Image (cartoon, coloured by chain):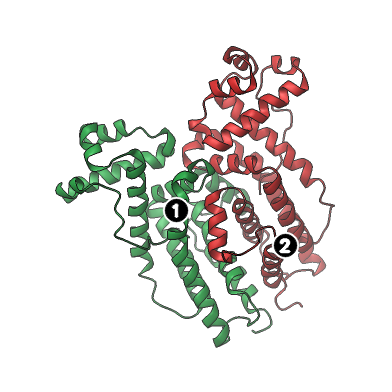
Chain colours: A green, B red
Amino acid sequence: MTTIIENKRIKYHKKTFENISVDKQKKVIETAVKHFAMYGYDATNINNIASDVGISIGSLYNYFASKEDLFLGVVNEGSLLLEKELSKIDENENILIFFEKILRLSKEFALNYPEFNQIYLNLTTQNLSHLSNKLCNKIEHITAEKYKKLIKISKEKGYIRADLSENEIAFCLDNLVMMLQFSFASNYYLERMRTFLGENVDIKDDSIIESIVSFAVNSLTKDIG
Amino acid sequence: MTTIIENKRIKYHKKTFENISVDKQKKVIETAVKHFAMYGYDATNINNIASDVGISIGSLYNYFASKEDLFLGVVNEGSLLLEKELSKIDENENILIFFEKILRLSKEFALNYPEFNQIYLNLTTQNLSHLSNKLCNKIEHITAEKYKKLIKISKEKGYIRADLSENEIAFCLDNLVMMLQFSFASNYYLERMRTFLGENVDIKDDSIIESIVSFAVNSLTKDIG
């Protein structure tokens, strides 16, 4: 599950970017999102981004020092957006309820903002490790800690088995969230989901989420009810 | 879980490729694997591959009609290799035992052949969907069917709960295998695994596999023992 850049103050643009109108800022980011999602980092040409925005390449370099910075700015934007969505999940101390909520939210986010998930897929590949190395901890840390905290509380409250490892269960649960998210992010994963769930599956149907929730709930509550 | 190109007879090279020595064929494929894994499809330059092999670009085009065909040839090679490894898993009718074996095998494969998993990660991104569209079904179909068959038998034999959906459980189990595999495939996922499991985790330690197995076994056997 991608989430939350820890320090929102990290900025990848130059100060000049803040001098243009919010609408124009949005247009630059949205156009960059489309290009990076469609072509991937390596094949994205920032001359084409400038041209689609309707500005010169010189202006674009006045806003972002490099293609790398523009890409990082876009990733940051996606993280902030997801953070905003995640804040809608009410604080809940039961990991089983949190898990269902985060699955639903991830699916909605993937359907509403497919480009951000496509960029995330790109970011996790080995050839982009020079960009992603320092990002991973920022992107994954807060979600990981959230899971671990809720698993600990849920063990204490008796919602789930007391013998479970917080770290390992957090890893398993988030792995299921990641793969659901990916299933809506690229044609490959969409086709893979159909291969497993059947050609006629309605991918927007909630039964997929319900079955993943049952899978986890059965595991975490075995022998306690 | 990547596996098995259904029809081994699909060839992406030209006939001339078969006229050179097996050692030279291997050198071409191994060099291409390294380049595609390190740079990704888009940033791979086949002139550099030819140069690293020590042949002219004209010769390389005599063996493969295009960069796309060379890439597909490499993906095919990885699938055949994994198929060979998978054949070492004895036929077993119990999905719980099969699941543990496939987890161990996927981890070993990822550690022994990191490049193939890096290429696989690349293949699943949206910007390569023009290449992967027709490959997904071939790569995923046989594993998916294998899971479903074993889940069905295991339900009948009483190894697991009888009320489970074969399709949905197959999807959940393979999602856990995929994410373990990825955790050894790129720096991003390796860092993510450490974020969840702890900085000091020995990534080669078998306890990670044991915890994923327990997670699945608890789920599938709840209320039956």
* In contact (CB < 8 Å): disc 2 and disc 1: no
> Mark 2 and mark 1: span between their CA atoms?
27 Å
In the picture provided, is B5 more to the left or to the right than A197? right
Q: Is residue B155 above or below residue B56?
A: below
Horizontally, residue B188 falls left or right of residue B166, namely left
* Residue drawn at the location 22% of the way across and 33% of the way down: A58
The picture places residue B21, in percent across and down from the top left corner, at 77, 18
Which residue carries the number 1 mark?
A134
B182 and A217: which is toward the camera: B182
What is the count of numbered marks? 2
- The residue located at (69%, 57%) in the rendering is B204
Residue at image mark 2: B206
The reply to whether label 2 and label 1 mark residues of one chain is no
Task: Choose mark 2 or mark 1, whichever is in front.
Answer: 1
Q: Chain of mark 1?
A: A
Residue A66 occupies quadrant? top left
Q: Is residue A33 visible?
A: no
- Which amino acid type corresponds to the residue marked 2 in the rendered image? Asp
Q: Which mark is residue A18?
A: none
Picture quarter containing residue B52? top right
- Depth check: give the residue in front, A200 or B48: B48
Query: SS at mark 2?
Result: loop
Check the picture and name the quadrant holding the C terminus of chain B.
Answer: bottom right
Left or right: residue A106 versus residue A76 is: right
Rendered location of residue B74, percent (x, y): 64, 31
The residue at the far front in this view is: B200
In the image: residue A113, left or right of residue A150: left
Query: Does residue A137 sit above or below A68 in this rendering?
Result: below
